[in-house]
Amino acid sequence: MRLVDDHRIPFLRWLESDESSKKFIHKSVPSATGNEVLFNQLIKMGYLEGFHAWVGTSSQGSIIAYAEAKITGKTHKNELELIYVVAEVERGNGVASQLINDIISNNIWLLEKKLVAFINPANIASIVVLQKNNFTEVPSKFNGLKFSQQA
């Protein structure tokens, strides 16, 4: 589901409890001086063209995953770079696959854009997640692997 202000408390709780996810998400807004500032910036960025953010939640309503699609220096026209992270305790449980599937299935506007992901070749788990969601490897001029969503 789209990241909205109602996610503030569970999102901040997640960042406080999961250091690796916190570091990963802070890369999106390096100028954010704290988790609250980060969250506020992500909400503001959600109103900009070319930036979209989503969260995955557990059955208890806890935030367990975060994804964003945005225009970056690596993307071409009509591409959005997909970036995602899953809570450490949930990795390997299908959370990333489900979140990406939900994003693709529930956002019809994505038909106008192509999602791409740049992956470290050692990140086998992400490669598998992307392949499960109909992404294929395509040539890239950047280090690492580039995967592109296929119609």
Image (cartoon, grey):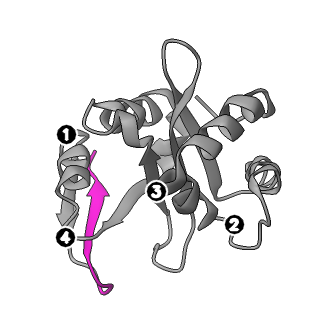
Q: Position of residue 76 (x, y in %)?
A: 46, 74
In the image, what residue occupies the spot 55% across and 73% down?
Answer: 72
Question: Is 74 situated left or right of 149 in this image?
Answer: right
Q: Mark 2 — residue?
A: 29
In magenta, the rendered stretch is 141-151
Question: Is 11 situated left or right of 114 in this image?
Answer: right
* Mark 3–mark 4 CB contact (< 8 Å): no
Earlier residue among tags 3 and 1: 3
Q: CA distance from mark 3 to mark 1?
A: 16 Å
Q: Mark 1 — residue?
A: 132
Amino acid at pointer 3:
Ile
Earlier residue among tags 2 and 3: 2
Query: Is residue 113 visible in the rendered structure shown here?
Result: no
Q: Mark 4 — residue?
A: 121
In the image, what residue occupies the spot 20% across and 55% down?
Answer: 127
Q: CA distance from mark 3 to mark 4?
A: 15 Å
Q: Dot 4 lies on which element?
A: loop
